[in-house]
Image: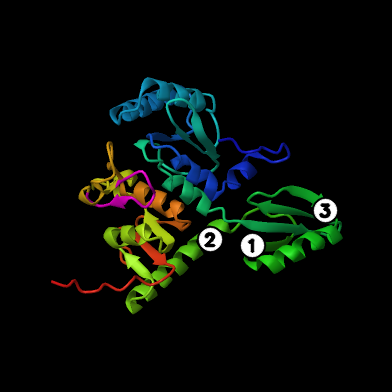
Amino acid sequence: MRAARPPERSRHDKVVSLRTWVLRDLYAGTGSVASVYFDLRAGGDQVFTRWHAVVEDLSRQGAGRGLVGVLRAGVLGTVPGRGVLVMFATDCRILLGVVMPEASAPERARYGLPHLLPLLAWLQGRPAHVVALLDRTGGAIVVHPGGAAADRGAEQVVEVVVPLQRQRPSLLSITAGGPRLGEGSCQASAGRTALLLAALDEERRQGGLAVVGAGGTLDALARGRVRTLLLSDDVADTGGAAPARMAWYGPAPADHALEPEPLSGLGAGWPRRGRLVDVATRAALGCGAEVHVLPTDATREVVPEGIAALCRDPAPPRWPSST
């Protein structure tokens, strides 16, 4: 899976141009995928010490030598660098590699379902937007994601910006002078989190389009009802002592449950056990839902289990069983 790489774009523009279909393609196969998050900023002998820790972790989870070799070439060929490198790979090739500048994701190594949550959280702080920089002599337009940056005259800026504003006003930011592009995107992400939690609380109180907790959310995902999945990272992945939350899954994105029994008829090799956050993320991307990552320590009152959803339509009625 290789996307086109226009030469005029910077590495940052390529990263921000990630599309949902690119991430969804990571689930195309039925085999396990290695997910590695590696900090590029620490160099010297620490690199090899940290890399050996990654290798040991992957080996404990069942990854083979061929897969480790593929990842080793990618990681050690990138350090030293800026930010965090995330790589997704199978035994024979790298499926996706992304450098996340200024990211603070902790180092992780997973083998099973792709572990997308830290990458999604980083992308979440860089929402799609258009920046138009204007001064007396002209201006520049930068479209994120999937756009290009170019110097334009003032009239050309207007020709490009006005249609964009009419189509999607929320994507547009116009400034005079030259501030850092994308400034304020983190605040926008925090604001969206607050709005989603407020909507979840309101819908929950009214008994409408909200589900809270692992059981109800997985059921809504299986039915294709979810519009926005809300997830927080495992406490186990952020330094806590609690064990990781687990679930069971089958070959299709809608095949999942908290216990293996409901999935017992899926055939040889199924179901498999995986982390709840990874199972839910796969299901959400598979049904076209948005995944919004919640801060772990700030949402327990509204989302006590760290998983919830806003749905497209109400839950179907439950008819009493006839006995």
Q: Is residue 316 above or below residue 164?
A: below
Q: Which residues are magenta?
A: 249-259
Of 305 and 33, nearer the camera is 33
Which residue is tagged 2? 187
What residue do we see at 27% from left, 43% from top?
Answer: 271
Q: Is residue 12 left or right of residue 225?
A: right
C-alpha distance separating marks 3 and 1: 19 Å
The numbered mark, 3 or 1, whose residue comes first in the sequence reads: 3
321 magenta-colored: no
Q: Is residue 320 left or right of residue 128?
A: left
C-alpha distance separating marks 3 and 2: 28 Å
The coloring applied to the image is: rainbow
Q: Is residue 299 above or below residue 115?
A: below
Report x, y in % for residue 15.
Answer: 58, 43
Element class at badge 1? helix
Q: Nearer the viewer, mark 1 or mark 2?
A: 1
- Indicate the amino acid at tag 1: Leu
The numbered mark, 1 or 2, whose residue comes first in the sequence reads: 1
Q: Nearer the viewer, mark 3 or mark 2?
A: 3
Element class at badge 3? strand
> In the drawing, what numbered circle is on residue 171?
1
Dividing the picture into quarters, in which one does residue 59 lie? top left
> In the drawing, what numbered circle is on residue 152?
3
What residue do we see at 45% from left, 34% from top?
Answer: 38
Report x, y in % for residue 126.
Answer: 56, 53
> In the drawing, what numbered circle is on residue 264?
none
Report x, y in % for residue 62.
Answer: 31, 28
Of 167 and 118, nearer the camera is 167
